[in-house]
Image (spheres, grey):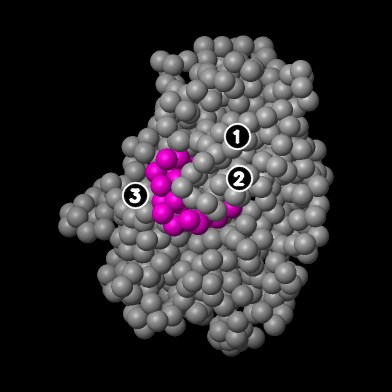
Amino acid sequence: MIKTNCAKLNTWVKMWADIMQPEKVVLCDGSDAEFTRLMDECVAEGLAKKLDDKKRPNSYYFQSDPSDVARVEGRTFICSRKKEDAGPTNNWMDPKEMKKILIGKYTGCMKGRTMYVIPFSMGPLGGPISQLGVEITDSAYVVGSMKIMTRMGAGALKLIEEKNDFIPCIHSVGKPLPEGLKDAKWACAPIDDKYIVQFPEEHEIWTYGSGYGGNALLGKKCFALRIASKMAQEEGWLAEHMLILKLTKEATKETKCVCAAFPSACGKTNLAMLIPTIPGWKVETIGDDIAWMKFDEEGNLRAINPEAGFFGVAPYTSAKTNKNALDSCSKNTIFTNVGLTPDGDIWWEGIGYDCPKGTIDWKGNIVNDPASRDADENPVAHKNSRFAAPAANCPGIASDWESPKGVKVDAILFGGRRPNTVPLVHEAEDWAHGVFMGSIVGSEVTAAAIGLKAGVRRDPFAMLPFCGYNMGDYFQHWIDMEKLPQAKGGKNLPKIFFVNWFRRDKSNKALPAGFLWPGYGDNSRVLAYIFDRCNGQGETVDTPIGKVPAKGAINIEGLDSCWNEKTMEQVLSVNVDEWKDEVERIEEHYAKFAGHLPKELSDRLAILKQRLGM
Ligand code: SAT
Ligand code: MN
């Protein structure tokens, strides 16, 4: 059994070891030597491959079970005491009932395995916005990944001992290993036997049956979003599914920090690591997925990235689409479900060069004829294959990305993938209007997306699968932020914008796929406009939905000639009929929250209707 100077930790580990009955219990120190030792053990047991040390130093390759390749939202539960407190967007079960089920599952679940105890900090060690947790797991892959994704080990343990407190995170792959049997390449439980469970009132996380990503690396979505969002509601701060970037105007060296929330597949990581196409601007990365924001003593909202690494989708990451991301996984990286090349490197669709013959695909099959492979039907790398890479590897990481007190947030962006209706950028008139914008975030989905009708899938604040309590109460918390004493009257609050890089005019054949805006590095043009707006510059015009840039306020110099003044007019236009339709969709969306919908939001919708003449 482990012996630390934290009595609570010792007792808790003993209790779980008695239930789970592991062969041994190991307290992780988070050292580089421990990482290499555990990963090399995985290699020796046939669970992983070490990549060529010259091409990818200290990097490892894993293939998951084909049934365990992503987060499982259908098996994710918010177990508050009252169902109403989980709200209309979460799966709920009574916490007592859920604990009974899970104790049953956990009993003896680590037989024949090692129980690893992982002390970790989300955010810089000891920082005023940071939080401490301990994860128990039976997966060495999880230990290695937590080492990359969090500040893990001895430093965090010392703080936990001082505080005698931590957020308990329980994980097991759910597959005891009978004596004498060889382990599976990737141990996990069948889909219906996976449980991703948050107890928001107790601030506890219990997960079972999956070894993949957010199901198993509990610092990430389970803690830093679901549990932290609840803690933030209780304590007056924000835990958000947002990237953080730092924008510098090189002529004056002036900087602004921007947090941005987008549903998946809207290019969040690309925006976080953007390389500007307009001269004189620099973008640096602070985080690519999660932001924790708290008011400082002056009433400024400050943000930290609670993570220490990027858990990025591999396919279509290339030197062209995102050089910073690609460079981030040049060493000390764990790859999962990508292709493995014959010379001991990795490959994925869209990496920027052809698949070498003899590559092994994510399912373990040899690719003999790469050219004839259908990348859509039968990709070499699974579409949700990932790299876990230290953020410190990123060439574009900001020098103050680990500042314990965080960076001052100047602007907050919401956005989605909307082929129509929503202009390239519009600005909130006040805080409540900005919250309204966050509450109606959504992305166009095709009918093919599992179990959904074609149309806009609403994903408020991009938090749909990550809000640890009633989403209506979460809207209210956002509204209330402005009035908190810590906000000092709300005078320093960030400005809020809504962006849409994806508006289209399919009839215009000169435009690539009809996109009215080039996107990618050219999004720096919109960021530059937002920067100016934060300084009270940049001309706007009022529309029923908020302020849009005046003609010429966004610099389009040097763009390909298919994007011009005419397409700018289109991409910034506000069409009253489209918005009337949008309002009806918003009303359907809002109806779900019933009595939990803040009055400020229904008032804001009423203003919009009135302006549209509805
Ligand atoms: O698997 S993670 O939750 O870490 C990433 C994601 O699915 O968004
Ligand atoms: Mn995410």
The residue located at (50%, 62%) in the rendering is: 239
Give whichever of 610, 364 is nearer the camera. Answer: 364
**What's the distance in space between the residues labelled 2 and 3, CA to CA?**
30 Å
Q: Position of residue 475 (x, y in %)?
A: 58, 74
> Magenta segment range?
148-168
The residue located at (46%, 41%) in the rendering is: 152
To which residue does mark 3 refer? 402
Disc 3 vs disc 1: which is toward the camera?
1
Q: Position of residue 258 (x, y in %)?
A: 38, 59
**What's the distance in space between the residues labelled 1 and 2, CA to CA?**
9 Å
Give whichever of 604, 97 is nearer the camera. Answer: 97
Q: Regarding mark 3 in the picture, which secondary structure is present there?
A: loop
Q: Position of residue 290 (x, y in %)?
A: 49, 54
Q: Earlier in the sequence, mark 2 or mark 3?
A: 2
Q: Residue 302: say if magenta.
A: no
- Beta carbon of the mark 1 residue lies under 8 A of ligand 1: no
Q: Residue 155: say if magenta.
A: yes
Label 2 neighbourhood size at 10 Å, few (<14), some (14-19), many (20+)? many
Amino acid type for the residue under numbered disc 2 = Val
Q: Which mark is residue 25?
A: 1
- Beta carbon of the mark 3 residue lies under 8 A of ligand 2: no
In which quadrant of the rendered image does the N terminus lie?
top right
To which residue does mark 2 refer? 13
| Contact check, label 1 and label 2, Cβ < 8 Å | yes
Q: Earlier in the sequence, mark 1 or mark 2?
A: 2
Amino acid type for the residue under numbered disc 1 = Val
- Residue 422 vs 279, above or below: the answer is below
